[in-house]
Image (tube, grey):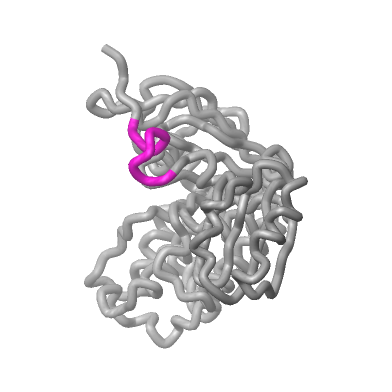
Amino acid sequence: MLKVTNLRKVFDRIIAVDSVSLEVKRGEVFGLLGPNGAGKTTTIRMILNIIQPDSGTVTFNGLPFREETWNIVGFLPEERGLYRKSKLINTILYFATLKGMSERAAKPVAMKWLERFSLVDSAHRKVEELSKGNQQKVQFIISILHRPQLLILDEPFSGLDPVNQILLKDILLELRQQNTAIIFSTHQMDQAEKLSDSICLINKGRVVVEGSVADVKKRYGKNSVHLEYEGDGSFLGALPYVRRADVYQNYAELELSDMSQTRDLLTGLDGKLSLRKFEIVEPSLHSIFLNVVGTPGSAAAQPRKATA
């Protein structure tokens, strides 16, 4: 359905996107991942023809992205673009007409979605009177009202509480079952891991990891151990056989140099922590993200400059 080939964009000698290629099929949820400034939003804007790439191509159903394509694409931008003084229902209907729907056809569909998101009672309130999370719901309704073939979501879970994150997840899976192609950009690796069929991880404008979630996790091996415990786990990262440690208050994900060292790890924990769980697992996307991208301030996190 969507094929992106070697997209490149440079702003003031900073390479925002460098030779990014990806392909999204019907009925697929595709996670576009990466740290802040990695080039995700710029890639999305080039896919949508909002900005022109310096080079590369985007095709939709085998054809270049054209103005008519907008009517079969839904887009949820990261920045809110709602008219703050307008009433909810009027805002939704206005955007529906931009997608080729009549107000008469759009209104019952809009009311159905407002009911799904518990916003029927707010239909005649002004946008500015809504919470951040409810404004996000309205923007999502606008992006799906016309039943797009391709849905592109930039940070869709932003501002949503856990209950509404679950609701949004359920709707995305319903759309997937209806053969909608979905691209979503997010910083929430747990959501990406649970929702995505395939992912593309971008860092400094370049694709550094891509493929199905299962293949990506398999590629990074099974040297990951999850611990749940009581006690102070701050020492875990300093153990000689631990390559990387992601440590929280009562939970840690460790990457070992070699899985043969699990016995050494258990011995090293004896008397220091009260273990509730010790599990050998495939690495999480969160772990892979940190492993590939690095931490803030590291060389891996710095933007790339174009050569003269």
Vertical order, 81 against 112 (above or below): above
Looking at the picture, how far across and down is residue 161, in whole percent? 46, 75
Quadrant location of the N terminus? top right
Furthest residue to the bottom?
Answer: 121
Position of residue 211 in the picture relative to residue 236 (left or right): right
Residue 267 colored in magenta in the image: no
Q: Which residues are magenta?
A: 295-303
**Which of these two is toward me, 209 or 281?**
281
Residue depicted at x 28% and y 77%? 126
Looking at the picture, how far across and down is residue 60, in whole percent? 57, 34
Residue depicted at x 44% and y 71%? 160
Residue depicted at x 49% and y 33%? 65
Looking at the picture, how far across and down is residue 286, in whole percent? 56, 53
Q: Which of the 4 quarters of the picture holds residue 298? A: top left
Residue 299 colored in magenta in the image: yes
Position of residue 21 in the picture relative to residue 176 (left or right): left
Examine the rendering and report whether any part of residue 229 can be seen.
Answer: yes
Question: Mostly what secondary structure, the magenta segment?
Answer: loop
Vertical order, 62 against 88 (above or below): above
Vertical order, 110 against 81 (above or below): below
Position of residue 195 in the picture relative to residue 189 (left or right): right
Residue depicted at x 40% and y 69%? 159
Position of residue 204 in the picture relative to residue 110 (left or right): left
